[in-house]
Image (cartoon, grey):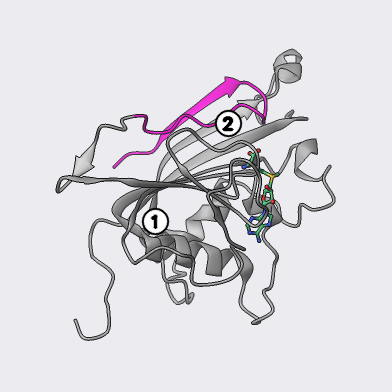
Amino acid sequence: MSLETKTEFGTARQMIEADGDFSRRIDDVDLVRVDLACGKRKKEGFIGVDKVATEKTDIVHDLMVFPWPFKDDEVYEFNCEHFVEHIPMTLPSGENGLIRFMEEAYRCLMPGGTIRFAAPYYTSIEAWQDPTHVRAISERTFVYFDRKAMQAADLDHYDIKTNFEAVSRIYRLHPENEAYSDERRADRKGCCCFAHRAGLAERRIVAGD
Ligand SMILES: C[S@@+](CC[C@H](N)C(=O)[O-])C[C@H]1O[C@@H](n2cnc3c(N)ncnc32)[C@H](O)[C@@H]1O
């Protein structure tokens, strides 16, 4: 699958457009869509998970506590806006926070399922304005969760149990940037939306298979 990339003007508050086809069913079953760390802005048609019970939260759960309340391969689509940059570097267990998060999303996603993120781009002033942001996010962040890319980079000895493939990327520049010539480097404010698909090539191996 090829990677679709585009640049548009907009603000970080604009929500990512999701698949939108809510009539789609697989094996006559409704598809499970989950908005991770939804806060007060849950995506329509999604189950909202947040550690805080807002009016939009359907499941109160701390996403740094594993496992999440979903079965293996249960979720068709995850939406996750303005949360990855808050994920702690290290969990109390000593595990890397982002790797553990991505592995858990991968466990819950059905093969071919999608996870979409929106995060402030690492060069943007918005990446570091909030004292609760603890990591910078760029397109390179997600290379480490793509097995083929890791093989190509000779980094497949990393112990990361995911097989995501990047399917689309949107660089969203704040309208204030219109005055600047270079699209990305002059990015004083801006965010990036990423969609990644869980590997179709194999189903995850469960003990006893
Ligand atoms: C910047 S807000 C984004 C909210 C929403 N997705 C949006 O785009 O407006 C971050 C959200 O992450 C939630 N959050 C922070 N840590 C969390 C955790 N460990 N587990 C679940 N939710 C968490 C917060 O309660 C907050 O609603």
In magenta stretch: residue 10: yes
Left/right placement of residue 125 relative to residue 47 reads: right
Residue 119, image x and y in percent? 63, 42
Measuring 71% from the left and 14% from the top, which residue is drawn there? 178
Please give left or right for residue 143 compared with residue 53 in the image. Answer: left
Task: Answer few, some or many: residues within 10 Å of disc 1's Cα (few below 14, many 20 plus, some between 14 and 19).
Answer: many
Residue visible at 66% across and 45% down in the picture: 54
Q: Which amino acid type is shown beneath numbered disc 1?
A: Phe
The residue type indicated by label 2 comes to: Tyr
Q: Position of residue 58 (x, y in %)?
A: 53, 49
Name the magenta segment's main secondary structure: loop
**Where residue 75 is drawn, which disc sits there?**
none
Would residue 130 be visible to someone looking at this image? yes
Residue 105's x, y, as percent? 45, 60
Residue to which mark 1 is pinned: 164
Q: Which range of residues does the magenta coloring cover?
A: 1-20
Q: Do labels 1 and 2 touch, CB within 8 Å?
A: no
Q: Is residue 168 above or below residue 140?
A: above
Which quarter of the rendered picture does the N terminus lie within?
top left
Image spot of residue 138 (x, y percent): 61, 46
Which residue is the site of mark 2?
A: 171
Pick whichever, 55 or 35, lies toward us. Answer: 55
Q: Is mark 1 within 8 Å of ligand 1?
A: no
* Closer to the camera in the image, 192 or 23: 23
**Is ligand 1 within 8 Å of the beta carbon of the residue shown at mark 2?**
no
- Judge by depth and name the residue closer to the eye, 162 or 40: 40
Asked if residue 149 is positioned above or below residue 158 in the image, the reply reads above
Q: Earlier in the sequence, mark 1 or mark 2?
A: 1
- Asked whether 152 falls inside the magenta stretch, the response is no
Marks counted in the figure total: 2
Whether 193 is drawn above or below 33: the answer is above
